[in-house]
C-alpha cells in the first residue's frame, strides 16, 4: 500500500510547492519592508493503518505558513497559507459548500492550496477592528459546540482533529470594544461558506440515517448537489456578544443569525432512479441565543454554556421522502478542568442536545447526551506527553477511545502515535464509523 503513494505525488507536490513558494515570496518581501514581522512554517505528515484490513487508510501531508506583520503601533496584518496532498482514497474533503470567494486557489482530488486566514487589524487600547478572512471563536467549552456555532468547521475527519472544532475562516469584519466593565464583540461573515464534509466514499463520510435524512445509502450509489454558496447578505452570518465579570467568573450573552452548518437533505422527484439516489443539500438560516459562564475555583475551572435555537430545520420520518420541519432546539453543556494530583490534567464535559418533538417523528433521539473525558500528563521534563481521551454518546452508547503518545524530539520536531478505536451501533453518531478504527502516526516539523 505504501506504493499507493503514486508517482503523481511528485508532479502535484512540485506544482503546489512552486505556487506556495511564489506566493510566500511576494508576501515575505512585503513583510520584510515592514517594521516588524515573523513567519512560521510547519510540515505535518499523518499515516493511518486500518484495523481490519491493515491497509493505509490515511496518508496526508500538510504545509502551513503563518506570517504576522506589525505595520506600526496600531496596524498589523496576518497571512496563513495551507498546502495539502492526500492519497486518492483519503480525500481532502468536499468544497462544494464553499462560497466562490472562499474556494481554494488550487484544487483537485489529491492536492489543494488555499488561504487559511488573511486579515488586516487595527488595535487601540480598548478597541480593535479586523477585516479579512478570519474566525469568530465564541464559547468556553473544549471542543463541544453549544454557543460556538458561528463558524463552519472541517468535518472531513469527523472529530479526529488536533483542534476541535477545526474552524473554517470566512471573509468578513469583526469589531471588539470595551466600555466600562463590558466587552462588546460584533462579527459579520459575509461569505456563505458552510461546513466541509467528507467526500462520498471517504473514510468519514456520514452513513448513519440520522445524517442522511433516513436514506440507507450504504449499498446504493449516491450523487449530491448543493445550493450555490455566495458572498451575499442573504447567506451571511452576523452576531453580537456582550461579556461582563460576574462574581469570580465571566458571563457572556450572545446572539447570531446565519445559515446552519448542518445540511438539510431533499430529493427532487424527477431525479430518483432505481439505480442511483440523487439528493440535494441546503442550509436554511437559523437564529441562536446563548450564554456562557466560566469561573476558576482553586485548581479547578468550571465552564457552562446554554443555547436556544427557535427555528431549527430538521429532516423527519415521513411517508414523504426527506420531509423537513422547523422546530425548537436547546443545547446545554458543563465542563470541568482539574489539575489533579501527580501532575495529571483532567478535562470532563457533558452536553445535552434537545429537539422539541411535536407531532412528527425524528430521525434521531429527541435528546442526545454527549460526554468527553480527557486525561494527560507530561513526562521527561515535558518532552513526552501521555494522553487518553474518551468521546461518546451516553444515550446511544457509542463512542471512540483515543490513547496517544507525543514525543518532542526537539523544539522543531514532534513525533506522535495513537489509536482511534470506535464502537457502538452502526446507526449511531460514532458507531457508523466503527469499521474504520485505526492506528496512526504523525510527524510535524516547525521552523
Image (spheres, rainbow, N blue to C red):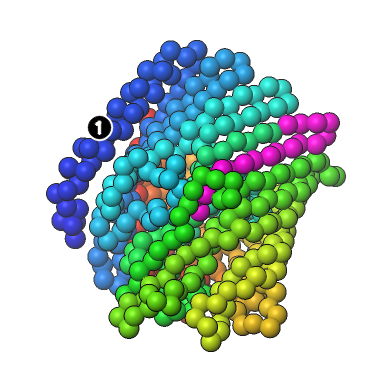
Counting from the top left corner in percent of width and height, residue 278 is at: 38, 72
Counting from the top left corner in percent of width and height, residue 312 is at: 64, 66
Is 386 included in the stretch rendered in magenta? no
Residue at 48 percent across and 26 percent down: it is: 68
Is 179 included in the stretch rendered in magenta? yes
The N terminus, quarter of image: bottom left
Counting from the top left corner in percent of width and height, residue 179 is at: 80, 31
Q: Main secondary structure of the magenta part?
A: strand
Counting from the top left corner in percent of width and height, residue 201 is at: 33, 67
> Quick check: 34 left or right of 273?
right
Residue 94, image quadrant: bottom left
The C terminus, quarter of image: top left
Magenta stretch?
177-194
Residue at 68 percent across and 22 percent down: it is: 124
Residue at 53 percent across and 17 percent down: it is: 71
Residue at 61 percent across and 15 percent down: it is: 73
Res 88 visible? yes
Mark 1 secondary-structure assignment: helix
Residue 355, image quadrant: bottom right
Q: Which residue is mark 1?
A: 18
Considering depth in this image, is 384 or 277 the residue closer to the camera? 277
Amino acid at each position: 500500500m505504501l506504493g499507493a503513494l503514486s508517482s503523481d505525488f511528485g508532479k502535484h507536490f512540485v506544482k503546489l510547492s512552486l505556487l506556495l513558494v511564489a506566493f510566500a515570496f511576494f508576501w515575505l518581501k512585503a513583510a520584510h519592508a515592514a517594521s516588524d514581522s515573523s513567519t512560521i512554517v510547519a510540515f505535518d505528515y499523518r499515516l493511518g493503518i486500518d484495523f481490519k484490513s491493515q491497509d493505509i487508510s490515511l496518508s496526508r501531508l500538510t504545509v502551513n505558513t503563518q506570517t504576522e506583520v506589525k505595520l506600526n503601533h496600531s496596524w498589523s496584518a496576518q497571512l496563513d497559507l495551507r498546502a495539502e496532498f492526500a492519497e486518492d482514497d483519503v480525500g481532502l474533503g468536499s468544497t462544494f459548500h464553499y462560497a466562490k470567494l472562499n474556494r481554494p486557489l488550487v484544487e483537485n482530488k489529491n492536492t489543494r492550496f488555499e488561504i487559511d486566514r488573511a486579515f488586516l487589524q487595527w488595535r487601540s487600547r480598548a478597541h480593535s477592528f479586523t477585516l479579512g478572512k478570519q474566525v469568530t471563536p465564541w464559547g468556553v467549552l473544549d471542543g463541544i459546540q453549544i454557543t460556538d456555532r458561528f463558524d463552519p468547521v472541517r468535518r472531513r475527519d469527523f472529530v479526529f482533529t488536533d483542534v476541535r472544532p477545526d474552524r473554517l475562516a470566512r471573509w468578513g469584519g469583526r469589531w471588539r470594544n470595551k466600555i466600562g466593565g463590558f466587552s462588546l464583540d460584533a462579527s459579520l461573515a459575509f461569505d456563505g461558506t458552510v461546513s466541509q464534509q467528507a467526500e462520498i466514499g471517504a473514510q468519514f463520510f456520514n452513513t448513519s440515517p440520522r445524517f442522511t435524512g433516513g436514506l440507507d445509502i450504504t449499498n446504493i450509489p449516491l450523487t449530491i448537489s448543493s445550493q450555490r454558496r455566495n458572498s451575499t447578505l442573504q447567506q451571511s452570518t452576523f452576531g453580537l456578544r456582550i461579556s461582563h465579570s460576574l462574581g469570580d467568573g465571566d458571563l457572556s450573552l450572545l446572539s447570531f443569525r446565519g445559515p446552519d452548518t448542518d445540511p438539510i437533505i431533499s430529493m427532487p422527484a424527477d431525479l430518483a432512479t432505481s439505480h442511483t439516489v440523487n439528493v440535494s443539500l441546503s442550509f436554511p438560516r437559523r437564529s441562536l441565543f446563548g450564554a456562557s459562564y466560566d469561573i476558576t475555583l482553586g485548581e479547578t475551572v468550571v465552564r457552562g454554556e446554554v443555547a436556544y435555537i427557535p427555528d431549527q430545520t430538521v429532516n423527519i420520518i415521513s411517508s414523504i421522502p426527506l420531509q423537513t420541519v422547523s422546530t425548537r432546539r436547546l443545547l446545554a453543556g458543563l465542563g470541568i478542568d482539574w489539575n489533579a494530583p501527580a501532575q495529571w490534567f483532567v478535562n470532563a464535559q457533558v452536553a445535552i442536545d434537545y429537539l422539541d418533538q411535536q407531532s412528527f417523528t425524528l430521525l434521531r433521539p429527541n435528546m442526545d447526551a454527549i460526554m468527553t473525558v480527557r486525561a494527560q500528563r507530561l513526562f521527561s521534563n515535558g518532552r513526552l506527553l501521555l494522553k487518553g481521551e474518551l468521546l461518546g454518546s451516553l444515550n446511544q452508547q457509542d463512542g471512540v477511545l483515543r490513547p496517544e503518545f507525543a514525543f518532542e524530539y526537539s523544539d522543531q520536531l514532534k513525533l506522535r502515535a495513537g489509536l482511534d478505536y470506535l464502537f457502538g451501533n452502526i446507526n449511531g453518531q460514532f458507531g457508523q464509523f466503527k469499521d474504520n478504527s485505526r492506528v496512526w502516526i504523525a510527524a510535524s516539523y516547525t521552523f
